[in-house]
Amino acid sequence: MQVNPIITTDSSPKLVEEERSNGRIGNFLGGLNATLRRLVFRVIASRPIPEHIAFILDGNRRFARKWNLTEGAGHKTGFLALMSVLKYCYEIGVKYVTIYAFSLDNFNRRPDEVQYVMDLMQDKIEGFLKEVSIINQYGVRVLFIGDLDRLYEPVRIAAEKAMEATAKNSTTYLLVCVAYTSSHGIPRAIHEACEEKSGAMANSIRVMNGNGFFNGNGYTNVNHGSQAVIKVVDLDKHMYMGVAPDPDILVRSSGETRLSNFLLWQTTNCLLYSPKALWPEMGFWQVVWGILEFQNNYNYLEKKKKQA
């Protein structure tokens, strides 16, 4: 007859009871946190809620150094923080969330770090695909934004599968900027807009800005009905981010205020929020304070948008 190892010592029943007690406490605290979140969000929802929040995920490597972890552990912890932040944004009613996951400039980092991030990205996207039925229940559409041909092939294939699997969803959107910079996206949009209107342009290219155009020498009036004119709206349409409205809040963690070549075209009238928390430390209260900051500046931001 085999003896159950759980009851072979006098201390085992005590350990089992402690585990059960810890489990009950954990469930209680989890329920308490969920209730607190709902109460806070109910209060926040009485004022304007941002439609679109963009995040620069800054501080994964500094977090790893701070806690004497490997760089890979910093990125993994940052991914867990991302999942929590996304949940809070969607719970409060934010429709669009954009994340700066990997810049074109990041390809200049050490090859082993680039490879690690690519492997991590592939692993998380494939894990996402395994749960896609649950994702579809929440109506989340995932879009990967940037020069996807620059991604390592397994990552690109996984990204394309994720976009295809969620293509019919429209409740909320997650835009993942990979192999992206504004200095790449803006010239690309100009090039595509020029190609679109090449038949009407003849020998000149005119870029509208308000009531005039730039021709290399200065601004002058033009005929608004001209087919050859490239308007700002034409450029907007060809931007990588043309699939979503401009962000209401741009969040950069770790207290930095640099935009790092991210959404330069789209953030003219956007609130910049820079919590001191490193990205893996981001959580519920950072999201709440960011939205409160937006609400406190809402009238000013709306006034600037109307003047633009």
Image: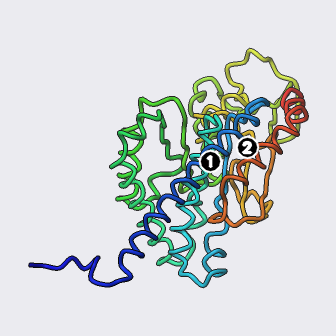
At horizontal 55% and vertical 53% (from top left) the residue drawn is 28
Front residue of 202/37: it is: 37
- Give amino acid for label 1: Gly
Residue closest to the far top:
225
The mark found on residue 265 in the picture is: 2
Question: In the rendered image, which residue does mark 1 sit on?
Answer: 185
Q: Position of residue 291 (x, y in %)?
A: 76, 43
At horizontal 50% and vertical 65% (from top left) the residue drawn is 22
Residue closest to the far front:
10
Q: Label 2 neighbourhood size at 10 Å, few (<14), some (14-19), many (20+)?
A: some
At horizontal 35% and vertical 78% (from top left) the residue drawn is 12
Front residue of 217/275: it is: 275
Q: Position of residue 185 (x, y in %)?
A: 62, 47
Q: Contact (CB < 8 A) between labels 2 and 1?
A: yes
| Residue 20 higher or lower than 247, as above or below | below
Q: Label 1 neighbourhood size at 10 Å, few (<14), some (14-19), many (20+)?
A: many
- State which quarter of the image contains the C terminus: top right
Residue 219 occupies which quadrant of the picture? top right
For this view, does 28 lie left or right of residue 3? right
Q: Position of residue 113 (x, y in %)?
A: 50, 75
Q: Secondary structure at mark 1?
A: helix
Front residue of 263/73: it is: 73
- Give amino acid for label 2: Trp
Q: Secondary structure at mark 2?
A: loop
| Residue 68 higher or lower than 136, as above or below | below
